[in-house]
């Protein structure tokens, strides 16, 4: 892993992003926008699953209308995040919090997939119910917690000195 | 406190230094962990605020949430936009107090504060009527532009 990080560190693109005055801040800003878009829209779905918002709309209607925004935010976040990571692989290799950020990100992803290919398949049975099944509510809580942890771990990576 | 010299002649030098030297400013610099923790709460509030606001404003523009009246979306999401805003307002001043004197010299800080005032005024005067009247596209557009500029200037503050 370390040798991969060292190789990445010496690629021309990594050097270019690192040494440019503007590219890194711009990527950082766009990455933040991406995370806000993902977390800020997925929380609307989570709140519906928990019965805390948009209760009058069917679950599938909320998911169908909000998810495209979440997914485009995710693409944006992943692209800019990869470029940021590409520019400083060695710092992230030695980072205490970066692995946690990736872990929570993966957990959020697994949770979303389990929801989508699990209880959500039977959404027809509880689509309009203000109170969703326990498994759907659990998915909502796990999602909110995971994204809070992703944001917090991300901030910790920004401030830690390694 | 580190020595500080003001490059710009804005009118609040002493007040800003006082805030930085206050117990709250010292608390915010007291440990390495506290600032990132408060900033995380700030960002979680921002996510809630921006996410719900975006869906409502994009709804006004006819680009999101098209299957029901915008007023219904606005009514359902507005409490969460407000919750996010409260989190932002509660944590922002604490983050500010950690390095108040530094922000005094940062032109982007003043741009952000100006945008914040304009965007908040617009929110509380024009945009809050969204739930009552037939939707007006321009309200969504203005609101989006104002809040995105505010959020971007907040992030750019770090780099100036």
Image (cartoon, rainbow, N blue to C red):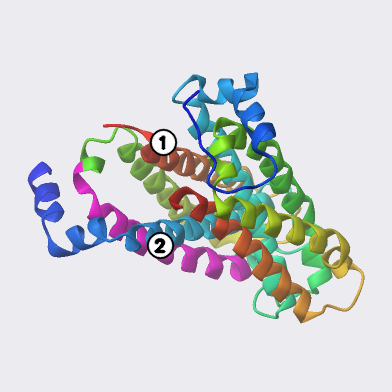
Identify the image quadrant of residue A75: bottom left
Q: Which chain's residue wears label 1?
A: A
The C terminus of chain A, quarter of image? top left
Check disc 2 and report the residue beneath it. A26
A125 w.r.t. B102: above or below? below
A6 w.r.t. A33: above or below? above
Residue B29: image x %, image y %? Answer: 51, 24
Q: Secondary structure at mark 1?
A: helix
Outermost residue toward the right? B132
Residue count near mark 1 (Cα–Cα under 10 Å), binned few <14, some 14–19, many ≥20: many
Residue B55 horizontal side relative to residue B75, left or right: left
Q: Is residue A136 visible?
A: yes
Residue A152: image x %, image y %? Answer: 47, 38
Residue count near mark 2 (Cα–Cα under 10 Å), binned few <14, some 14–19, many ≥20: some
| Chain part drawn in magenta | A64-90
Q: Is residue A68 magenta?
A: yes
Spatial CA span between label 2 and label 1: 20 Å
The N terminus of chain A, quarter of image? top left
The structure residue drawn at horizontal position 52% and vertical position 58%, both measured from the top left corner, is: A38
Of circles 2 and 1, which is in front?
A: 2
Q: Which mark is residue A156?
A: 1
Q: Which chain's residue wears label 2?
A: A
């Amino acid at each position: 892993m370390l040798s991969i990080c060292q190789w990445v560190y010496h690629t021309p693109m990594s050097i270019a992003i690192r040494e440019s005055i503007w590219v890194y801040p711009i990527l950082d800003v766009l990455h933040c926008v991406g995370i806000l878009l993902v977390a800020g829209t997925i929380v609307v779905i989570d709140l519906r699953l928990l019965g805390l918002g948009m209760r009058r709309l069917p679950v599938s209607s909320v998911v169908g209308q909000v998810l495209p925004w979440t997914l485009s935010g995710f693409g944006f976040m992943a692209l800019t995040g990869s470029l940021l990571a590409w520019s400083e692989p060695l710092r992230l290799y030695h980072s205490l919090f970066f692995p946690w950020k990736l872990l929570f990100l993966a957990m959020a992803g697994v949770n979303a997939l389990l929801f989508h290919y699990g209880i959500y398949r039977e959404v027809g049975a509880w689509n309009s119910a203000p109170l969703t099944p326990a498994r759907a509510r659990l998915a909502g809580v796990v999602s909110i917690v995971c994204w809070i942890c992703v944001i917090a771990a991300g901030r910790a990576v920004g401030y830690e000195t390694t | 406190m580190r020595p500080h010299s003001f490059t710009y002649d804005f009118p609040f030098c002493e007040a800003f230094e006082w805030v930085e030297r206050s117990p709250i400013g010292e608390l915010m610099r007291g440990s390495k962990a506290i600032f990132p923790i408060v900033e995380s709460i700030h960002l979680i509030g921002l996510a809630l605020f921006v996410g719900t606001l975006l869906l409502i404003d994009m709804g006004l523009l006819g680009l999101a949430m098209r299957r029901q009246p915008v007023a219904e979306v606005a009514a359902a999401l507005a409490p969460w936009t407000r919750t996010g805003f409260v989190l932002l307002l509660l944590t922002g001043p604490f983050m500010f107090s950690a390095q108040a004197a530094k922000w005094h010299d940062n032109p982007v800080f003043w741009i952000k504060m100006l945008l914040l005032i304009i965007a908040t005024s617009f929110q509380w005067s024009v945009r809050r009527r969204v739930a009552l009247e037939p939707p007006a596209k321009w309200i969504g557009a203005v609101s989006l532009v104002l809040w995105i500029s505010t959020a971007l200037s907040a992030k750019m503050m770090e780099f100036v």
